[in-house]
Amino acid sequence: MNGGLVRGLMTMAIGVLLIVMGDGAMELLVRLVGVAFFLPALVSFISVYSKRKEAGKLPSVAIAVIDVGCMAFGLWLLVNPFSFQSVFVKLLAVILLVIAFFQVYEVLSTSLRRSGGWKMLVAPLLIAAIAVYLFFWTSAAISLVAVIIGVVAVVSALSDIVLAIMLRKATNKELVVVDDATVEEDSEVGQGE
């Protein structure tokens, strides 16, 4: 499956989750980030400590400090996700901005710009503008921001999916044109003999 389709489907799932659950989705996402910090750090800490203990050496202080720090941060996110929600909104806005710029790059770097694909620039540029606005907008309720980011994520996902399909079609057309040109050259060589 194409990377654009996978990215689009994942973005759409997050966007729908944000729209449906609103404020609860932000809390859930922050807690999931907490789990993502806590569990790998815990596994790393146990693994390093047990391996070093078997070898008769003390664990590396730097690794232990990093693991304990990640576990503490993960626990903080799990216990008090509301303190991190505003930062998480800014993080989501930055992620949407990166996705929008990547979509603009894909359109500009492919043959879509020659075949009327410039229309595909509208959605990514609109998404980028909304993402920048959300990054600096701090006065709204978190549930409203969650729904806005959810809608923007769904639009971004649809744009990503359409762009991936258009790129696939454009690539297939270029391959067919190259194959036809090769066939015509071969037939001319055969006639000259």
Image (cartoon, helix red, strand yellow):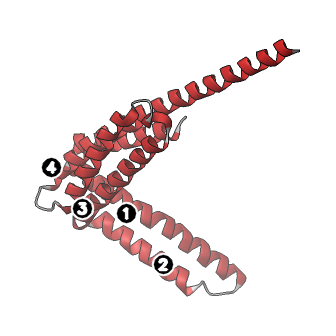
Q: Secondary structure at mark 4?
A: helix
Indicate the position of residue 20 as horizontal and vertical percent values.
23, 40
**Going from the N terminus, do you reach mark 4 or mark 2 first?**
2
**Alpha carbons under labels 4 and 2: distance apart:** 35 Å
Quadrant of residue 107 within the rendered picture:
top left
**Alpha carbons under labels 2 and 1: distance apart:** 15 Å
Report the disc number at residue 66: 2
**Going from the N terminus, do you reach mark 2 or mark 1 first?**
1
**Going from the N terminus, do you reach mark 3 or mark 1 first?**
1
Q: Secondary structure at mark 2?
A: helix
Report the disc number at residue 85: 3
**Alpha carbons under labels 3 and 4: distance apart:** 13 Å
Q: Amino acid at mark 3?
A: Gln
**Alpha carbons under labels 1 and 4: distance apart:** 23 Å
**Residue named by callout 1:** 34
Q: Is residue 32 above or below residue 121?
A: below
Task: Kindly tell me whether residue 4 is visible in this rendering.
Answer: yes
Q: Amino acid at mark 4?
A: Leu
Q: Is residue 48 left or right of residue 18?
A: right
Q: Is residue 36 above or below residue 119?
A: below
Assess disc 3: are there few (<14), some (14-19) or many (≥20) residues with their C-alpha within 10 Å of its C-alpha: some
Indicate the position of residue 188 as horizontal and vertical percent values.
78, 16
**Alpha carbons under labels 3 and 1: distance apart:** 12 Å
- Report the quarter where the C terminus lies: top right
Q: Nearer the viewer, mark 3 or mark 1?
A: 3
Report the disc number at residue 144: 4
Task: Kindly tell me whether residue 81 is visible in this rendering.
Answer: no
